[in-house]
Amino acid sequence: MQTRHFRLVWNLIVGLMVAISVRPADAQEAARRREAADPTSAVRQATPTLEGAEQHVYKTVGDTELRAYVFRSAEQADKPRPAIVFFFGGGWRSGSPTQFAPHCRYLARRGMIAIACDYRVAQRHGVVATACVEDAKSAMRWVRSNAEMLGVDPNRIVAAGGSAGGHLAACTALIREFDAATDDLNVSPRPNALALFNPALILAPVPGELEMDPAKYKELEKRAGVAPERISPYHHLRAALPPTVIFHGEADTTVPFETARLFAQKARELGSECILHAYPDATHGFFNANRDSGQAFRQTIQQLDAFLVEHGFLEPAG
């Protein structure tokens, strides 16, 4: 059993630390073709163009402008709308906000303000994972601070993401440090709900459940920039976690299903709602729009839709 536990966590570390080469794109059309072919590809231009989205700079770090891509329906809203903020995956090393553009377009049509956020990553900006956490918290504060301009209800904001992006979304709810010096700390980054797709939720040993070789722990510590417990959502779970839905493949060898199960179990033991949708035979990234003719994308987005309806973020579909 202990060997199995070690293997589970080691697979997680391999998945988070894997290096993916990044090359800039020369043209918007090439970027759109890549988005259609593979939304999770790390071969991206640094500032992608997402068709149908408004671009806003939510944060500037040195000469780096971090953008929020805002999708909304063409209908004029007569009242503030709920919002959902997506963070892409890529092991904190790479990735692009284009990953969740299909999710944003769907939810914008359903009446939400849907936002895909960029954040700093290792291969483009030379940062460690704590900077990614900082940027995610800044993005959530920016949405809440600019709720009137965006047409957003500041009390109905969902944080969402996949893999490392799911980790960041969870961190906005649970991690109380790693705030940007320029952030207004009077504005909460805490979401009103969480939607997580094969998220990385356990980054350190869980005695009796998940073990880790000390040498591998040190490798992750270097990648994270701090002791991994400090940015491990599981290790910061407490009562009153926002309502949470998780989509995870049981055959995921990058972020093992067992980590999601343990997180959901602990959250429920603490009295929080945490729904775990398990997908038999599904591997990492199964939910992306380009995978398997989009079948899992359609299924997970419908399950997310139902969750959002249940919690008052969406009206039932007509």
Image (cartoon, rainbow, N blue to C red):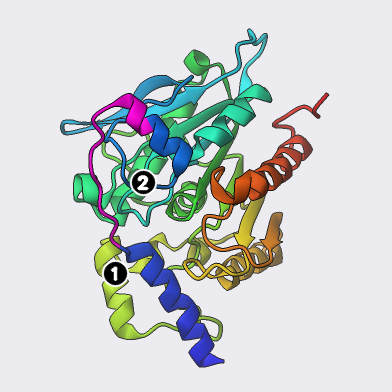
Q: Is residue 12 visible?
A: yes
Question: Dot 2 corresponds to which residue?
Answer: 95
Residue range in magenta is: 19-31
Q: Nearer the viewer, mark 2 or mark 1?
A: 2
The CA span between labels 2 and 1 is: 21 Å
Residue sitting at the far right: 318
Asked whether, in this view, residue 124 is left or right of residue 285, the answer is: left
Residue found at x 30% / y 53%:
93
Placement of 280 over or under 59, stated as above or below: below
Label 2 sits on a secondary structure element that is loop
Placement of 268 over or under 291, stated as above or below: below
Asked whether, in this view, residue 53 is left or right of residue 311, the answer is: left
- Residue 187 or residue 81, whichever sits in front: 81
Residue 247 found in image quarter: bottom right
Q: Is residue 107 magenta?
A: no
Label 1 sits on a secondary structure element that is helix
- Residue 155 or residue 16, whichever sits in front: 16
> Where is the C terminus found, in terms of image quarters?
top right
Image position, residue 65 (x, y; %): 25, 29
- Residue 12 or residue 213, whichever sits in front: 12
Question: Dot 1 corresponds to which residue?
Answer: 221
Image position, residue 140 (x, y; %): 45, 35
Asked whether, in this view, residue 225 is left or right of residue 147, the answer is: left
- The tag earlier along the polypeptide, 2 or 1, is 2
Q: Is residue 28 magenta?
A: yes
Residue found at x 44% / y 53%:
175
Number of numbered markers: 2
> Where is the N terminus found, in terms of image quarters?
bottom right
Which residue type carries mark 1?
Answer: Glu
Residue 27 found in image quarter: top left
Image position, residue 202 (x, y; %): 48, 67
